Amino acid sequence: MKPVLLIATLASLAMTGCSDLLSVDPIATKEMAVKDANLVGAWTAQADDSGTVIVRQKDAGYEIQYVDGESVSRFRALVFRVGNAEFLDVTPQNEVPFSIAGHALVRVWTSAATLRWAYLDSEWLRGQAGKTLESRKIGKQLLVTSPGDAVLELVKKFGADDKAHGDIVTWNKL
């Protein structure tokens, strides 16, 4: 996937699945959620300024909005860590009838001025998931039907590996 409007394309998660690796069940729990003050704020992509991402803390997690003109897409996310690596479990905030709100895994690197973001959905990671988790291949995508704790074990084993994620998009704080 090209890094032009990464968060904007999250809007299609519930219907078409932007990430090539989606879980039916949540991966992170509220008990394992951590807070990252650097994540909160308004962001614009370095590669393309056609929208704004707004991240707000809410309870144990975060609300993410992508605003492009009059269009607003809303998501929920929990932040969790495995070792020194930080991840988001992202799902659409508004459920759509006749669709499954999948959970996408995102690796994040935060600082006060930048947010780096990459889906955990590389071909290599999909191969690892296909070997160890119950899943169904739908075109290029892998839909994981194993429980979230099994997916978490995969993240613990492979999530911090650079082979696990796709392109990294860098966002600047507004």
Image (tube, helix red, strand yellow):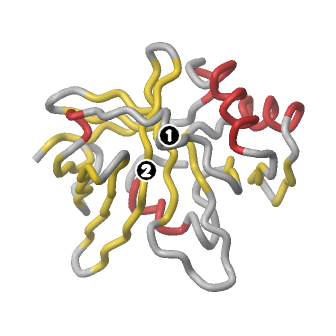
**Spatial distance from mark 1 to mark 2, Cα to Cα?**
10 Å
Q: Left or right? Give the position of 36 relative to 2.
A: left
Q: Total marks drawn?
A: 2
Above or below, 49 relative to 11:
above
Q: Residue 109 appears at what percent x and percent y?
A: 35, 27
- Which numbered disc, 1 or 2, marks the residue closer to the eye? 2
Q: Which residue is mark 2?
A: 77
Q: Residues within 10 Å of mark 2 (few under 14, many from 20)?
A: many
As helix, strand or loop, the secondary structure at mark 1 comes to strand
Q: At 48% from the left edge and 37% from the top edge, which residue is drawn?
A: 31
Q: Mark 2 falls on what kind of element? A: strand
For image coordinates 26% across by 70% down, the residue present is: 68
Instruction: Compare residues 99 and 174 and report the one nearer the observer.
Output: 99
The answer to whether the residues at label 1 and label 2 have Cβ atoms under 8 Å apart is yes
Q: Is residue 117 left or right of residue 48?
A: right
Point 81% across, 33% down: residue: 127
**Residue hosting label 1:** 106
Residue 173 spot, x, y in % from top left:
15, 42
What is the x, y in percent for residue 36?
Answer: 28, 33
10 Å crowding of disc 1: few (<14), some (14-19), many (20+): many
Q: Residue furthest left?
A: 174
Instruction: Determine which of the numbered discs, if any, sits on residue 127 in the image.
Output: none
Could you say which quadrant of the image residue 159 lies in?
Answer: top right
Vertical placement of residue 8 versus 167, above or below: below
| Amino acid tagged 2 | Ala
* Image-quadrant location for residue 166: top right
